[in-house]
């Protein structure tokens, strides 16, 4: 009974302090929304509307038709028409275009001879994604050549599968982003909340009261579980409203998975708080976990495509398992039971981190 | 109340507290006097079970520490050196929080808090954020929070290091009131005037207890004479006296010098006068009453010169 009222006192204090700390309070709401907008709009592997210029020196019926088809792919956004390849190079250098299409004077003859390439693509190769797109475009003139034999419209087909309009990036990004945002906020909030108390000396006062370590830790963590679930709701709302990301599976399953994931991250935050002495160190440690959670979890790059070593590291991150759960539940309509190994992995992770944190916390007073 | 035998604490190779024996009686104010790093805080932390002693035995209020320290928590109050309540909560919220933490009966919480606010001159600002208060106000709030649950033992770790002299006087008045009510108080300080107010005092130096007793007994049993030298050129006088056999320490206070000489010297004033005459420094020498600072200098055996 006393224990419960002490727990209540800690929770109440946390919430009160959180409400007064406008910056943190703003982060609770602002961070997920801003991240969603940033990631949702900016991380976009559908490459479209690359700035393109054309230097058509041939000016034949055939060349004009080719240029029109390049435009129709939607990959290239024809911004400029210039007279020479030198002008294309200048535009590339200035960064005003990323693709330059040069059609030589003897375009028609080259197409018929098939001995020399009929079109030159000048590409800003600094971004591999753009280069990849340009490589796709490269196949066009050859196809076009066969098109002169009567098979009209073929050129675009070579490119189109890659830009399948159904393959929208946010659908893939948002479920993963949930994990990234929760990792960031949950770990950081708990770690900072405890380290701050140590820095300010509050902890020395608290451990001299009848409050037990367990009451203190649970009392500090409980409010953040609630915050995590609120953030999840926010992410789902923004994802659904702005990016039309579906939740095809059960929302209850999703929330259960998220609760376990949040618990794992809070436990990790607690563990971090026992390892560091300043808030700044806590932030650094969070980034240390956050970066691999973004890069190695399958959020940014397909997990199967990663080297074996990176995959092993990835398996050690809660976010990897959570992303499999969210993508499974939200996109493939999988049930929690089907994905139970991932859920168990998260639960195990939470248990281990919490045990380590509790062990270190009681020692910490010495 | 508190009994410690051979209390020792190492931090790595550093010996912070070295086989300390303590006996602190009930309803008294017991002082720890010592410079920074003398082991005052470490000792207090060991007494309340925050730190595990490397060696020795401690009983606090009849409870073995740190073994049963948890059962002790509700019977001791602790005030940290740094203000450690919550700066982003109001006076009232802080006290309500502490009342809940100490499981103070819910129906009597309001009454107890009102009493504390009145006793510690905080009644006019219950809704002020603790972080925005002055040093003296923070200190009163910290004391109010530390005694909220009416502890038998109050541990105060340099409670007055951040407040002005007037606040310090008021603070000590509150401590005496608490002691009169039967609370045992252990307070660490590096101020001589505060040490002077304690019923009993232990002087700590580099982790070891070098003196223990009432301030009066310590002064009487110092084993030194104090000779006060008044000179127009105290610096020259100090130069002349430095290194004289039989002089333990010389401390300058304005134009005066306080010179400590062992009891074994029969005519301490004569010794000093003779020495100064030889050097041709005009001065007046008189035997003076010992101060606690003289005791401190004498027992720490640290010859000090210059202004304190």
Image: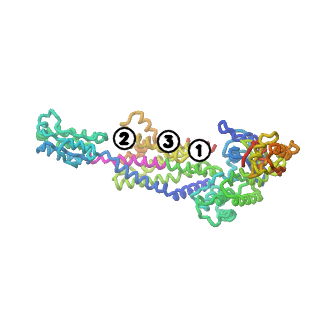
> Of circles 2 and 3, which is in front?
2
Residue A183, x across and y down, in percent:
46, 47
Q: Evaluate whether label 2 is on the same chain as label 3.
A: yes
**Of the image marks 1 and 3, the number of the one nearer the N terminus:** 3
Read off the chain for label 2: A
How packed mark 2 is, by other alpha carbons closer than 10 Å (few <14, some 14-19, many 20 or more), is few
Q: Which residue, given by chain and number where applicable, does mark 1 sit on? A: A361
Q: Which residue, given by chain and number where applicable, does mark 3 sit on? A: A349
Q: Quadrant of residue B38?
A: top right
**Of the numbered discs in the image, which one, if any, rests on residue A149?**
none
Indicate whether residue A66 is drawn in magenta: no
**Of the numbered discs in the image, which one, if any, rests on residue A301?**
2
Q: Evaluate whether label 1 is on the same chain as label 2.
A: yes
Labelled pair 1, 2 in contact (Cβ < 8 Å): no
Residue B14, x across and y down, in percent:
67, 38
SS category of the residue bearing label 2: loop
Read off the chain for label 1: A
Q: Is residue B186 visible?
A: yes
| Magenta highlight range | A163-186
**Relative to A171, is B97 on the left or the right?**
right
Residue A363, x across and y down, in percent:
61, 42
Q: Quadrant of the N terminus of chain A?
A: bottom right
- The answer to whether residue B216 is above or below residue B96 is above
Q: Quadrant of residue A164?
A: top left
Q: CA distance from mark 1 to mark 2?
A: 36 Å
Indicate whether residue A182 is drawn in magenta: yes
Q: CA distance from mark 1 to mark 3?
A: 18 Å
- The answer to whether residue B138 is above or below residue B11 is below
Magenta: main secondary structure: helix
């Amino acid at each position: 009974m006393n224990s419960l009222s002490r727990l209540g006192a800690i929770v109440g204090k946390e919430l009160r302090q959180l409400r007064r700390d406008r910056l943190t309070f703003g982060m609770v709401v602002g961070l997920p929304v801003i991240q969603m907008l940033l990631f949702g709009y900016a991380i976009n592997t559908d490459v479209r509307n690359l700035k393109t210029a054309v230097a058509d020196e041939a000016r034949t019926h055939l060349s004009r038709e080719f240029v029109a088809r390049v435009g129709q792919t939607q990959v290239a956004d024809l911004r400029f028409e210039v007279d020479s390849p030198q002008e294309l190079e200048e535009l590339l250098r200035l960064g005003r275009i990323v693709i330059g299409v040069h059609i030589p004077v003897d375009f028609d003859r080259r197409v018929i001879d098939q001995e020399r390439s009929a079109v030159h693509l000048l590409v800003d190769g600094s971004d591999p994604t753009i280069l990849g797109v340009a490589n796709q475009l490269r196949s066009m003139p050859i196809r076009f050549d066969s098109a002169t034999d009567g098979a009209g419209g073929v050129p675009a087909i070579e490119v189109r599968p890659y830009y399948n309009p159904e393959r929208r990036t946010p659908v893939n990004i948002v479920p993963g982003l949930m994990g990234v945002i929760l990792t960031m906020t949950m770990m950081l909030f708990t770690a900072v909340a405890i380290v701050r108390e140590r820095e300010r000396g509050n902890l020395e006062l608290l451990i001299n009261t009848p409050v037990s370590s367990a009451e203190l830790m649970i009392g500090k963590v409980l409010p953040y579980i609630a915050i995590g679930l609120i953030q999840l709701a926010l992410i789902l709302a923004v994802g659904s409203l702005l990016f039309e990301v579906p939740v095809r599976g059960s929302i209850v399953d999703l929330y259960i998975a998220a609760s376990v994931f949040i618990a794992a991250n809070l436990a990790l935050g607690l563990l971090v708080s026992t390892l560091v002495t300043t808030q700044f160190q806590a932030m650094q440690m969070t980034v240390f976990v956050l970066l691999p959670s973004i890069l190695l979890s399958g959020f940014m790059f397909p997990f199967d495509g990663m080297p074996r070593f990176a995959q092993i590291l990835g398996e050690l991150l809660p976010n990897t398992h959570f992303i499999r759960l969210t993508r499974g539940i939200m996109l493939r309509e999988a049930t929690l039971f089907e994905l139970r190994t991932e859920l168990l992995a998260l639960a195990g992770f939470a248990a281990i981190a919490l045990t380590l944190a509790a062990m270190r916390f009681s020692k910490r007073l010495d | 109340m508190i009994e410690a035998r051979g209390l020792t604490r190492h931090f790595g190779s550093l010996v912070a507290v070295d086989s300390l024996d303590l006996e602190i009686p009930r309803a008294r104010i017991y002082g720890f006097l010592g410079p920074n790093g003398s082991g005052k805080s470490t000792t207090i932390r060991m007494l309340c079970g925050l730190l595990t002693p490397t060696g020795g035995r401690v009983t606090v209020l009849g409870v073995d520490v740190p073994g049963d320290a948890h059962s002790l928590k509700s019977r001791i109050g602790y005030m940290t050196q740094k203000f450690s309540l919550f700066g982003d909560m109001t006076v009232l919220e802080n006290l309500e929080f502490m009342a809940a933490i100490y499981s103070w009966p819910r129906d009597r919480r309001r009454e107890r808090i009102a009493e504390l606010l009145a006793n510690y001159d905080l009644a006019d600002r219950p809704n002020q954020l603790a972080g925005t208060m002055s040093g003296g106000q923070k200190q009163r709030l910290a004391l109010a929070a530390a005694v909220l649950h009416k502890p038998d033992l109050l541990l105060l770790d340099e409670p007055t290091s951040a407040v002005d002299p007037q606040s310090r006087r008021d603070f000590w008045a509150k401590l005496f009131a608490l002691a009169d009510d039967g609370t045992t108080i252990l307070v660490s300080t590096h101020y001589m005037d505060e040490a002077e107010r304690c019923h009993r005092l232990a002087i700590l130096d580099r982790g070891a207890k070098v003196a223990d007793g009432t301030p009066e007994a310590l002064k009487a049993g110092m084993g030194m004479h104090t000779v006060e030298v008044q000179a127009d050129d105290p610096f020259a006088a100090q130069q002349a006296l430095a290194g004289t056999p039989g002089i333990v320490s010389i401390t300058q206070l304005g134009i005066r010098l306080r010179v400590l000489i062992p009891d074994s010297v029969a005519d301490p004033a004569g010794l000093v006068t003779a020495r100064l005459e030889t050097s041709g420094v005009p001065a007046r020498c008189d035997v003076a009453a010992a101060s606690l600072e003289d005791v401190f200098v004498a027992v720490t055996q640290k010859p000090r010169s210059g202004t304190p």
